[in-house]
Image (cartoon, rainbow, N blue to C red):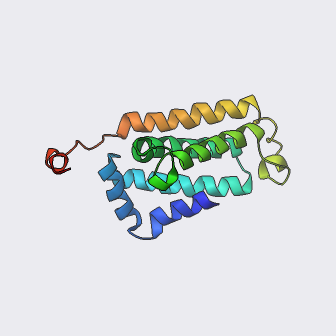
Amino acid sequence: MMIFVHGYNKAFRGGKLAGTGRWFQSMGMRPGKVHATLAAGTEMGVGVLLVLGLLTQLAAAGLIALMVVAFWTVHRDKGFMITGEGWEYVALIAVMSLVTAILGPGAMSLDYELEIAHRLDGMTGLGIALLLGVGAGAAQLLLFFRPPKPDPAVDADA
C-alpha cells in the first residue's frame, strides 16, 4: 500500500502533478507532466492491485518497471545506501516484486478466488515480471529519457 501513497503524493500533495512534472522534466523524463501522470497512476494502480491480490504478476511487473526507471534516472550514480539517495531501496522493491510474481498471491487474494493464482505463479510469474517489468522500464527510458546536459558554468564552480 505504500506505493499507492507515493503515487498519491505525486498527484495530489505538494506541487501536485504540475510540480512532479517539472521535477521529472528536470531529470530528463520528457514530457515531464505526462511521465508524472503515468508514474502516479501506475503507483496508485499497482498499490491497489497488490492489496487486492488481483493480477498480482502484472502489478509486480508494473512496480519493477517503476523501479527500473527510478534506478536509472535518480539513484544509480548516488551509491548504494539509501541514506545518500542510493539505489538500495529501489533494488529491494524490485527484488521483492519479482519474488511476489514468482510466489504469487495467497489464498485471500482475488486471483485465488478467480482461480488464476496458480496459473501465473512460478516460472510464468518470473517471465511476466522480468519481460514486462524490465522491458517496459527499459522501453520508457529508451524512448523518453533525455538527461540534461551538464552546465559547464556549474562544473567550473565546483
Residue 100: x and y in percent read 71, 43
Q: Quadrant of residue 52?
A: bottom right
Q: For this view, does 21 lie left or right of residue 51?
A: left
Total tally of numbered discs in the picture: 0
Residue 131: x and y in percent read 59, 30
Q: For this view, does 113 lie left or right of residue 49?
A: right
* Residue at point 33%, 49% (across, down): 27
Towards the viewer: 101 or 81: 81
Q: Quadrant of residue 37?
A: bottom left
Position of 99 relative to 41 (above/below): above
Towards the viewer: 50 or 67: 67
Residue 18: x and y in percent read 35, 63
Towards the viewer: 6 or 45: 6
**Name of the residue lying farthest toward the front:** 158
* Residue at point 70%, 46% (across, down): 56
Residue 107: x and y in percent read 86, 50
Q: For this view, does 149 lie left or right of residue 110?
A: left
Q: Quadrant of residue 104?
A: top right
Position of 69 relative to 21 (above/below): above
Towards the viewer: 80 or 52: 80
* Residue at point 53%, 61% (across, down): 6
